[in-house]
Amino acid sequence: MALNDRETSQLRGALQEAVVKCSERCLYQASKWAAELLNAIPELSIDLDDSQLSDAGYAPTVLVQNADPEEAALEAKEINKYLLAKSLFDCREFDRCAAVFVPDSMLAGIATSKEVNTTPKGKGKSKATSARPAASGTALPKLSQRSLFLALYAKFLSGEKRKDEETEMVMGPQDLGTCVNKQLLTVSRYLEAWFEERKTEDGEDADSQGWLEYLYGMVLAKQKNEELALYWLVRSVHLFPMNWGCWLEMTSLISRVEDLNRIMPRLPQNIVSFMFHINTSLELYQHDTNLANSLDQLLNIFPTSSFLLTCDALLSYHAKDLVAAEQHFSRLLSLHPHRLDSLDHYSNILYVMNSRPKLAFLAHLCSSIDKFRPESCVVIGNYYSLLSLHEKAVQYFRRALTLDRNCLSAWTLMGHEYVELKNTHSAIESYRRAVDVNRRDYRAWYGLGQTYEVLEMHAYALWYYKKAAGLRPWDGKMWMAVGSCLQRMGRNLDGIKALKRALLAESYYDTNSSFGSGGSSAGGLRGAHMDPEILLQIATMYDDMKEEDDARAYMEMCVAQEEGPSANELGDSIQIHKDDGSDDDGEDRRNGGGLGGDGTGVTAATSKARMWLAQYAMRVQDWTTANRLANELCQDGVEVEEAKALIREVRSRMEAPGTEAGPAQ
């Protein structure tokens, strides 16, 4: 994707307008996003005189004139009140800000009249009058959309602030997570009345600018009316596509890739919807080659964009390429050393890599910049967790949640810490709260499964593991958990299917860690490794089912991992029947594809497999094979005494009169 000078100029102008309009409405995060993106566009290298500045897209746009004459007149009339309201909003006096344009008495009257008008049981007239409070004596004030948005948004935030104040201490005895924003009903009824009053015959409002649709969608999402919220948010981005906050609200409502694919045709086709698709795909843990190519195209336009560089790092993180992800975040930190956004993800990567010096540096940096940002608390909590100071880690995760109850990382990581502290009740509650914040968090679902498995409640554990595996269908760890849980429940056949899928999932990640080198074909799996532990577990389950031939085949594959199996050794042995959790684009991956490369060396799993094979050889009277495997076991240094006893038994059998060295017929 490459833009010419005119397109670049238009994009720069649109971003400038977005910064100003979002700032006017106190949408600070959306304004910051647009400003960062604006400054990531490379500047022209040539010097321009004043006559050329406007042609190059550098015309100053400190104040954006409203294109609608009626709205422009209202904004000019209200300018003094608007400046007062915005000043109060900036001082976080939300109720005073709202009262400048919409006093509480007026809001109460509208809410009451709305409630009265929606109670009649008549079919026709009640619907016609239910959303028109003006007809019942409470007329809506004549306000510009900018002022009305600011007032109602302030009322909405006032409710959020009061909800946080009424909420008990994080994870305290009375912290049930049931506090709600009491202003949602008032704001939603006012907006319903406003939209109904301006509705044309065809059901659309031609004069709307998209901001009030965004606020209404946000309120509906808080009320758990997700389908209707999505409808209004889509309307909003059609009217003003540069409001990134609206796109993020839509992302929070999409929980599956199918939902994303279904909504994309309904969206405006522009560069922001392109970014929305990438961001939402990453939220859904996608990491294919097409996504990487799309991100590269955007980075050609915005080479220093902190948002896109973060997406690039998360793309590698989801693909389990931790080294590349760490390098991307390190570069991002060098370009934007004071930016704390998404550094909690960076700390997770450093934690998994066990990089204590870098994590210590990151924790010190975040603390020096702003120790009371949720991201800083999560980074510091991860550092203490790496030091095995779990109580201290919980303290910082609690602090992050005190600052922001919707901090997903803190809920999930605090659950992990409670598991380490053997506090299963608190761990379950933390994971449940994480799922309430974001249903897409596979780590919280997986954590719930682990905790219930510790409690030996395997049916519950299996359900949560399946939820995690559904969110990460090509993560072998998820399917290993499903298979192990099924094994404990005595469902060996289903467990074998899950573990076979875990083998292919791990192979998929091995080949796709560097984008473009893998692919979905069977040949793309060559060079990956198979986990001996999974192979041993499958073989053990076959052995429990008295299917010795299959058990022996998988035990041999497990031993072969010490040196790496050849490309043709597996054949069809790990074929997986298509089940409910499969997707169409994975069919090629299931059709074999040998795994080769460097071996794992001797492990406990391969030694157990070798011992089983030696004992199997004894049962079928293949003394030569049994003797060879027993001698190898002595060299492994694992289970040496049992191996020596096996050698003595083999020699006694071989020395017995009339005994042949070969296997029994």
Image (cartoon, rainbow, N blue to C red):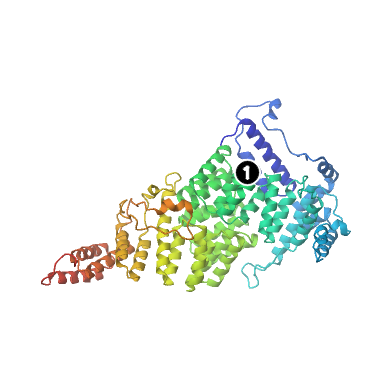
- In this image, 424 relative to 374: left or right? left
Q: In the visual, does 624 lie left or right of 318?
A: left
Which image quadrant: the C terminus?
Answer: bottom left
Residue 183 in the image: x percent, y percent? 75, 61
Answer above or below: position of 486 versus 65: below
Residue at the spot of label 1: 272
Quadrant of the rendered image containing residue 364: bottom right
Residue that sits furthest to the right in the current view: 137
Is residue 168 shown above or below 216?
below
Q: Which amino acid does label 1 sit on?
A: Val
Measuring from the top left, give residue 626's x and y in whole percent.
21, 66
Horizontal placement of 314 versus 629: left or right?
Answer: right
Q: Which residue is rendered at x = 52% and y = 67% of the image?
A: 448
Badge 1 element: helix
- Number of labels in the image equals 1
Query: Where residue 194 sits: x, y (%)?
Result: 80, 53
As displayed, is residue 151 above or below residue 654? above
Looking at this view, is 228 or 247 the one in front?
A: 228
Residue 501 visible here: yes
> Which residue sits at x=68%, y=37%?
13
Figure quadrant of residue 255: bottom right
